[in-house]
Image (spheres, rainbow, N blue to C red):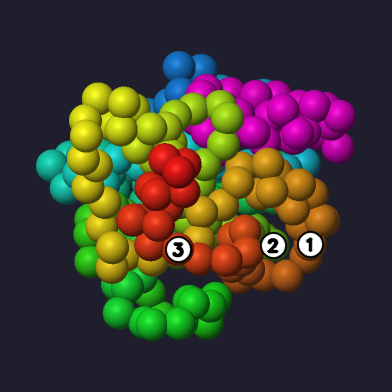
Amino acid sequence: MKIVILGTGGRLGAALARSFEKYDLTALNREQLDLSDLDDLRSKLDPISFDVFSNAAGLTNVDACETQRDRAFLINGEAPGVLAEICNAKHAKLIHFSTDYIFDGEKRTPYTEKDEANPISFYGESKLIGEKNVLAARNHHLVVRVSWVFGPDRPSFIDAMIRRAQENEKVDAIADKFSTPTYTHDVAQMLPQFFNCTVDDSILHFATAGKCSWQEYAQRPLE
């Protein structure tokens, strides 16, 4: 099986590339393939043969998305649709990663794949547009929503909290925001079972077991 992973310079993409080394793998970072250049996507992917394309790239800085809305829409919204079209032409499967930011956070129990999206940030809105563009291609593509991803390949919230604790006596963290920290290796171990899945309009929520607040998330490594 031939697999392409986009976003290997990031935390999740790097974990996927390491876990999928047993396949015929093409690993691409942002410098090699830029989602903001749609013509570049088409020209560089056209000569590559693959069965599965995993898109772990995107503009994930929430604050930057608010000030760079056109760029966020292009990278998070329009580009995934182009990737889906490219995959359709190759009869390949696209696995596109999305986020819990497509929800408004008002629900007090875990969100499921059947819950209606209602983003309250432009980051969430741009990611939701990307989801819709992928699923509109209708070729057994899969949208995987993840939350609070951490792993060894790039610094995460945990690393930031440790750094702040080393620099300051007091570290602030939000106590009323809850989710499930999810290990990149767990995502990578889960994914292969969906490579040959043939269900249209597929959305998957994946998270490691348990939940916590940002405050609890910050306290554990500091203890």
Q: Nearer the viewer, residue 25 or 60?
A: 60
Q: Secondary structure at mark 2?
A: loop
x, y percent for residue 40: 45, 25
Q: Residues within 10 Å of mark 1 (few under 14, many from 20)?
A: few
What residue is drawn where x is 84% and y is 31%?
Answer: 23
First of labels 1, 2 by sequence position? 2
Question: Which quarter of the image is occupied by the C terminus?
Answer: top left
Q: Above or below — where is 80 with respect to 11?
A: below
x, y percent for residue 119: 29, 67
Quarter of the view holding residue 170 = top left
Q: Above or below — where is 201 with respect to 114?
A: above
Question: Start and end of the magenta stretch?
Answer: 1-29
Question: Which quarter of the image is occupied by the N terminus?
Answer: top right
Q: Residues within 10 Å of mark 3 (few under 14, many from 20)?
A: some
Q: Which residue is mark 2?
A: 140
Q: Which residue is mark 3?
A: 212
- Distance, label 2 to label 3, CA atoms, is 33 Å
Q: Which mark is residue 197?
A: 1
Q: Nearer the viewer, mark 1 or mark 2?
A: 1
72 horizontally vs 157: left or right: left
What residue is drawn where x is 75% and y is 34%?
Answer: 19
- Distance, label 1 to label 3, CA atoms, is 32 Å
- Distance, label 1 to label 2, CA atoms, is 7 Å
Three-letter code for the amino acid on which mark 1 is drawn: Cys
What residue is drawn where x is 73% and y is 51%?
Answer: 191
Residue 23: within the magenta? yes
Number of numbered labels in the structure image: 3
Residue 149 visible to an observer of this rendering:
yes
x, y percent for residue 137: 56, 60
Q: Nearer the viewer, residue 187 or 201?
A: 187
Q: Secondary structure at mark 3?
A: strand
